[in-house]
Structures are given as C-alpha cells and as structure tokens.
C-alpha cells in the first residue's frame, strides 16, 4: 500500500531522466548565458548572496569582525546593494544581531545538527528555537538523508514540519544535499517532500563532505518549485550552495532560475546563493578590479 508521501511524489511530472536533465541544462545555458553577463545581473547576484562563515575556528570576535565588514560595505559602496544575509552557526546569532547595522541584511543560521542532521530530533528542535530566540531570521537545516534513502518519508516530513514550527516567524531553508542524493529522481522526491513539509526555500548542499551544488540538481529543484507553485499558489525560494565561488558558476544558477521560474524569482526574496568566496569575485567583476573586501 502506497502512503500519502510516496503518492504525492509519484504525482509529480518533473523530469527525472538524468540524461534529459543534462540536455535541458545545456540548452538553457546556450540560450541565456552570454546575454546574462551584464552589470545589472552581477549586482542582482551579489544582492542574493548569503555571506557565509561556517568554520571550526569561528569565534565571537571573528564573527563580529565578519559582520562589521557588511556594515562597512554599505558605507564604502553605498551605490551597490548589500548581500542578502549573513550565515553563521546558531550560537553566533546573538553576535550578528548585536553588531549588524544594515537592516535589510538577514541573519541566517544553520541548525538541526548541521551538516549531517545526525542527532536527536529534540536537539534539532531546541537548537532551532535557540537560534531564532538569538536573532535568526532564517534557519538552514539538512533533511534527514538516512531516513529519506531508507524510504521512511513520513519520519522525514514529520521532523521537517516540527522544525518549521520551531522557526516561528523565521524562514526555513531545507538542504537536500543533492550530491548525496545523486539522481534526478531522488532530488525530485526530496524537493517535493521538503516543500509539502513547509520549507520556505529548498537548498542544494551543505558544502561539507559531499559534491556541492550542480546545475542539473538546480534544474530539477526549480522545476519542482514551479510545479508546486502551480498546484498550491505558494512560492518557495531556491538556494544554491556548495562550491559556487566564481561569477561564471553563479551565472549558471541565475540562468536556470530565470529560464525555469521566471523574473518573479530573481530577487533575494526567492533566490539565494550561499558562498564565502563568491562575494569578492563578483564584486571584482562589478568594479572592474580585483577586490578582497570580505
């Protein structure tokens, strides 16, 4: 007997043939990449960055300095948009909240036993609640891949729904870890389950331990977002993360989002790129000189 989770996924018509997905991505890039190389697009991508520090060596002082650079950027480059968010470990949410002066920049925290999601559900819920209490506007959690790959999709969805409740008014980004999922069929299933469990964004990867973001995974995820919106009327955002460091790589994700979802999704409200090195690289392309600001 098919449960409602498998039934919901089976009703999706999103393409899952891996070869055809690659062909679709190649066609989108061939049609859109060259014309995307403009200053306006670079500025949009910069404004969609979740500027990230997730290091074992992070400390309150290093995170405070990291945040001060975002404050300084608004003063030094007032003609350019700020990044979308600062992404840190959950214990640093109060630090960013105290130091950050730029009101439009969100505070994002990884949570829920990041990056493996291997801890007690109660710990995931508590960590998420504490991050929100500490000032997080957005929470990035990893889907329980073990349960997903075992086919225990009810457990996966129940946990995500509980984490969504713990977020209160904060947005929930669900990381699919697409490099571990490996196939378009798995990426489609994980995308559908995450959205029906309340995800405000679906995100490619942690950048920790598995292959990071890919354009093929992005295509499948964005196709699922489009299908979900057509069925429910609710917009879900897309975030690429894990190895996106160059302007050229970022342009690929911009082209996928534009081609599949349209201009409505091309704003920080629905399009993000999680990165640390990308900000300096794309800023260099905007300014026409090598910059190491962040």
Image (cartoon, rainbow, N blue to C red):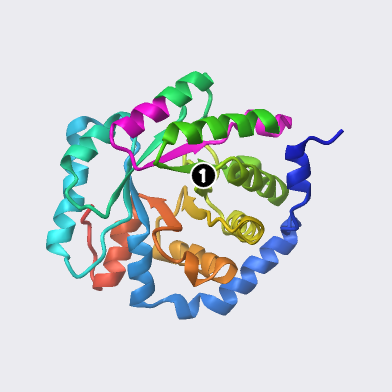
Q: Residue at x 73, y 38 (%)?
A: 5
Q: Residue at x 39, y 41 (%)?
A: 170
Q: Which residues are magenta?
A: 127-152
Number of callouts in the render? 1
- In-image side of 196 versus 213 (left or right): right
Q: Position of residue 115 (x, y in %)?
A: 47, 33
- In-image side of 249 versus 78 (left or right): right
Does residue 200 appear in this view?
yes
Does residue 57 appear in this view?
no
- In-image side of 59 versus 7 (left or right): left
Q: Is residue 252 above or below residue 173?
A: below
Q: Quadrant of residue 218?
A: bottom right
Q: Residues within 10 Å of mark 1 (few under 14, many from 20)?
A: many
Q: Is residue 112 above or below residue 271?
A: above
Nearest the eye: 89 or 278:
89
Q: Residue at x 38, y 78 (%)?
A: 38
Nearest the eye: 92 or 132:
132
Q: Which residue is mark 1?
A: 205
Q: Position of residue 195 (x, y in %)?
A: 59, 46
Which quarter of the figure is the N terminus placed in? top right
Nearest the eye: 256 or 12:
12
Residue 267 lies in the magenta-colored region: no
Q: Position of residue 205 (x, y in %)?
A: 51, 44
Q: Residue at x 74, y 63 (%)?
A: 20
């Amino acid at each position: 007997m098919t449960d409602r989770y498998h039934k919901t996924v089976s009703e999706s018509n999103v393409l899952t043939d891996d070869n055809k997905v690659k062909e679709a991505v190649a066609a989108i890039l061939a049609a859109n990449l060259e014309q995307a190389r403009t200053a306006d697009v670079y500025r949009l991508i910069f404004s969609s960055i979740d500027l990230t520090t997730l290091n074992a060596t992070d400390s309150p002082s290093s995170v405070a300095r990291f945040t001060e650079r975002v404050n300084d950027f608004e003063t030094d480059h007032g003609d350019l948009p700020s990044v979308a968010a600062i992404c840190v470990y959950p214990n640093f949410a109060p630090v960013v909240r105290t130091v950050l002066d730029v009101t439009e920049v969100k505070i994002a925290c990884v949570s829920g036993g990041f990056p493996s999601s291997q801890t007690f559900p109660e710990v995931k819920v508590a960590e998420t609640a504490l991050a929100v209490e500490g000032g997080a506007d957005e929470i990035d959690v990893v889907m329980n891949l073990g349960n997903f790959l075992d086919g225990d999709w009810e457990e996966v969805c129940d946990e995500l729904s509980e984490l969504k409740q713990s977020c209160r008014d904060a947005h929930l980004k669900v990381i699919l870890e697409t490099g571990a999922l490996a196939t378009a069929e798995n990426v489609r299933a994980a995308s559908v389950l995450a959205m029906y469990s309340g995800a405000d964004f679906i995100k490619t990867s942690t950048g920790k331990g598995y292959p990071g973001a890919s354009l093929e995974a992005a295509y499948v995820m964005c196709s699922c977002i489009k299908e979900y919106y057509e069925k429910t009327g609710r917009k879900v955002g897309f975030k690429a993360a894990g190895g996106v460091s160059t302007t050229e790589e970022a342009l690929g994700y911009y082209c996928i989002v534009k081609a599949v979802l349209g201009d409505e999704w091309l704003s920080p409200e629905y399009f993000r790129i999680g990165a640390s090195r990308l900000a300096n690289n794309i800023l260099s392309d905007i300014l026409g000189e090598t910059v190491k600001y962040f």
